[in-house]
Amino acid sequence: MIYITRHGQTDWNLQKRVMGRCDEPLNNTGINQAFETKKSLSSTKIDLIICSPLLRARQTAEVINQDRNIPIIYDNRMIERDFGEFEGMQKSDFDFDGYWNYYQNEQYQRAENIQVFFKRVYDFLNDIVEKYNDKNVLLVAHGGISIAVACFFNKNIPIGSLVEAGLVLGNCQVLSYSPQISKIKK
């Protein structure tokens, strides 16, 4: 089984600022959310944690892993989408919905193209499905990663804004997916 959780809350989440590669720490609410997730997963067998190397995800994984001693692998392919020139902006200050429209496929000066982003995440997911299909793996990642993961396992990329489609996980929300699927190319 593949489990995914998004990191706990940060101050930028509260301010509705976009946060890609910025290395913001969890705030007190985020730390408490991570402890709640730890508690909710306490009876779930987890063989391996694969985590984004960004601080907010690492902090979340470390809390969840307290007293469990589960191996943690940090994988750069789990880093949030690079917001480039939009990093730190309010979502209302640019076409946020267009930014998350797979079929619009905008090219930006510095921000990561959505189809390039999806390919990175899909390549990662194809690898873990192949390597760990008999394991329970917890992914600790980001909102954007959770969108790509949902599209991968649901075998569907909705038309329009993927955020508006309700695919992004809330802070420390956990979903599970069966890895018993065929590999997907994107």
Image (tube, rainbow, N blue to C red):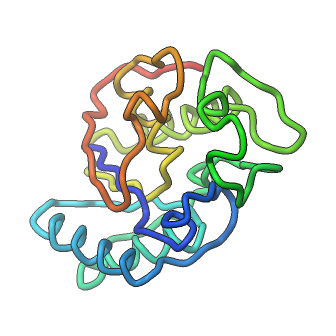
Q: Residue furthest front?
A: 92
Query: Front-most of 137 and 18?
Result: 18
Residue 95 as seen in the image, left or right of residue 118: right
The mark tally for this picture is 0
Residue 4 as seen in the image, left or right of residue 176: right
Residue 159 on image: x %, y %: 50, 14
| Residue 122 drawn above or below residue 32 | above
The residue shown at (36%, 78%) is: 29
The residue shown at (71%, 56%) is: 89
Query: Front-most of 93 and 126?
Result: 93
Query: Front-most of 21 and 50?
Result: 21
The residue shown at (48%, 35%) is: 163
Q: Quadrant of the N terminus?
A: top left
Residue 33 on image: x %, y %: 30, 72
The residue shown at (29%, 83%) is: 66
Residue 12 on image: x %, y %: 57, 67
Residue 53 as seen in the image, left or right of residue 32: right
Q: Quadrant of the C terminus?
A: top right
| Residue 8 drawn above or below residue 50 | below
Q: Quadrant of residue 134?
A: top left
Q: Quadrant of residue 95?
A: top right
